Image: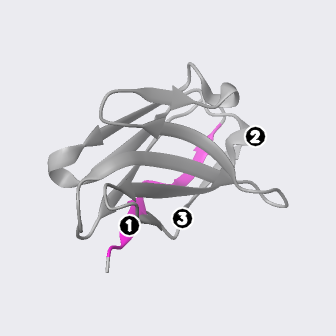
């Protein structure tokens, strides 16, 4: 069973940076797409960023501040978050899409940005 383990969350002041990681404990097939989502308190989960083998994409609120990257050898995706704002606060989840059409979610890591 594939499990995704996130790390790197924490408390940071406005304007600070954090780097999130998400690693698959095992892989059943190759990983096509890796996504980051987030869920703020009282709000629905929203998509944040995506990386494929060749491209990246970002939600408008994080463009220019967040950078997604991947290490295929480690089955890991990263999210470098700079210039953090209080509205970036929430639980961040990773999601991997495999070539066999399966997909898995991580359990989430909490990011809190204080004023």
Please indicate whether residue 80 sits to the left or right of residue 115 in the image: left
SS of the residue under disc 1: strand
**Where is residue 59 drawn, in percent x and y?**
64, 31
Furthest residue toward top: 64
Q: Residue at x 20, y 46 (%)?
A: 72
Observer-nearest residue: 72 or 107?
72
Please indicate whether residue 17 sits to the left or right of residue 1 in the image: right
Q: Residue at x 70, y 29 (%)?
A: 61
Q: Residue at x 31, y 81 (%)?
A: 1
For the residues labelled 1 and 3, the Cα–Cα distance comes to 8 Å
* Between marks 2 and 1 in the image, the one whose residue lies nearer the viewer: 1
Observer-nearest residue: 1 or 87?
1
* Residues packed near mark 1 inside 10 Å, few (<14), some (14 to 19) or many (20 plus): some
Quarter of the figure with residue 80: top left
Q: Which mark is residue 87?
A: 2
Q: Return the disc, 2 or 1, that comes first in the chain's sequence.
A: 1
Q: Is residue 61 above or below residue 29?
A: above
**Where is residue 56 drawn, in percent x and y?**
44, 28
Q: Look at the image and give the residue range highlighted in magenta.
A: 2-13
Q: Residue at x 44, y 63 (%)?
A: 103
Is there CB contact under 8 Å for labels 2 and 3? no
Q: Please, what is the dominant secondary structure of the magenta stretch?
A: strand
Please indicate whether residue 14 sits to the left or right of residue 108 in the image: right
Q: Which mark is residue 5?
A: 1
Query: Which residue lies under the disc numbered 3?
Result: 108
Q: Return the disc, 2 or 3, that comes first in the chain's sequence.
A: 2
* Between marks 2 and 3 in the image, the one whose residue lies nearer the viewer: 3
Is residue 103 magenta-colored? no
SS of the residue under disc 2: helix
């Amino acid at each position: 069973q594939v499990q995704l383990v996130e790390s790197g969350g924490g408390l940071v002041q406005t304007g600070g940076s954090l780097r999130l990681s998400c690693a698959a404990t095992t892989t059943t097939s190759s990983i096509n797409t890796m996504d980051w989502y987030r869920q703020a308190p009282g709000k629905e989960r929203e998509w944040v960023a995506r990386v494929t083998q060749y491209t990246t994409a970002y939600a408008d609120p994080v463009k220019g501040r967040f950078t997604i990257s991947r290490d295929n050898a480690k089955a890991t995706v990263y999210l470098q978050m700079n210039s953090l704002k209080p509205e970036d606060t929430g639980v961040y989840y990773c999601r991997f899409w495999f070539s066999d059409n399966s997909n898995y979610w991580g359990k989430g890591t909490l990011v809190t940005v204080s004023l």
